[in-house]
Image (cartoon, rainbow, N blue to C red):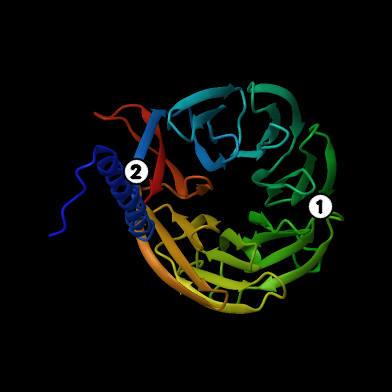
Amino acid sequence: MKKLPQNPGKLLAVAFGLSAFFGLAQIVPADDTASGTYKILTTTQIPAAGRIDYVTADSVNRRVYVACGNAVSVFDLDTYKLAGTLEKASGHGVAVDPENHTGLVSGNTATFFNTKTLEVIKTIPAQGADGYLFDAPTHHFIISSHRAPNLLVIDSKDGSIVDKVNAIGPDGANAAVEQGVSDGEGHLYFDVENAHHIAVVDAKTLKVTGHFDLGEKGNAPAGLAIDTKNHILFAMCRGGRGGTPTCVILSAVDGKIITTLPLAGGSDGAVFNPHTMEAFSSHSNGTLSVIKEKSPTEFVAGETVKTKAGAKTCTLDEKSDHVIVITREAAAGGGSQMLDVIFIGR
């Protein structure tokens, strides 16, 4: 066996060398963790003020927003703790402009507010409001609805109404609009639940430029995610009456269907993580389906993550790669309802 040098200086150098070596070696387990199974990391629970629908993460400013009853609860993405409350703001969820530090609560009376101070700036009539979308290039908040106007477009800088799009269905028909996404290149895409297709809208002109038919397995699309790099859409479809929940994967360029994969439940929300190249679909039956994009033409159904009953919508923290879902459940021992904010990761 070769003896270590007896000189103290040399011993110290060897120690540093070994430390550096083992430090580099520890990078490998990090890769193993990244390919491990998803699980619930932690759950933050507070009293529920009322009904819930959507959840939104602001990865830049480290906040996550949940509209619950007549208030919006704001949580810290790093500590998982409640960070503040926007009072007297009722709606389905919150669209956020990270750059201008503004938010919009999507409700019949939409609330435009300052995300730094949680102070209301103005309210906007938005009858029939449901889902929402923030398009960063245009700085537009877009509220979607199942009735006219199907889209209400609001300037995220000052809260002014930019335009209304009465109908985005085929042949100018009204559409039951669910989740929408932006490709960041001038195109907006919206699930049209009542017509098993996706409507394509020009982000600047706000004109409908096309419709992508989702085929016989694409009934009742409700969740929608996008891989902006490879221009791939993931339409999470509930399946309708007697149908099978299915993810229809298609080109965002021409609408050509690439493949279909089964889902573990009826979707009401979806998100795509460009770091892991995975799409997620959340379901009210307490499951989260993971779909792996191995290449722009090859996709596989991954694991099914157990969440909690009622956790039907999701969002992504792009910094930590955590998927966040929300639900309500009875407090321990019964009685009042609690809001659960569930953080999922590897």
What residue is drawn where x is 46% and y is 54%? 282
Figure check: 343 above or below 103: below
What residue is drawn where x is 29% and y is 49%? 18
Q: Does 201 sit left or right of 79 as displayed?
A: right
User: Which residue occupies the extreme left position in the image?
Assistant: 1
Q: What residue type is labelled 1?
A: Val
Quick one: quadrant of the N terminus? bottom left
Circle nearer the N terminus (2, 1) = 2
Q: What residue is pinned by disc 2? A: 41
Task: Name which quarter of the figure residue 209 lies in.
Answer: bottom right
Which of the two residues, 338 or 181, is positioned nearer the viewer here? 181
Q: Does 21 sit left or right of 130 as displayed?
A: left
- Any part of residue 216 in sight: no
Q: What residue is pinned by disc 1? A: 165
What residue is drawn where x is 54% and y is 48%? 318
Mark 1 surroundings within 10 Å by alpha-carbon count, few (fewer than 14), some (14 through 19), many (20 or more): some
Q: Rounded to the nearest whole Å, what is the CA distance between mark 2 and mark 1?
A: 41 Å
- Circles 2 and 1: CB distance less than 8 Å? no
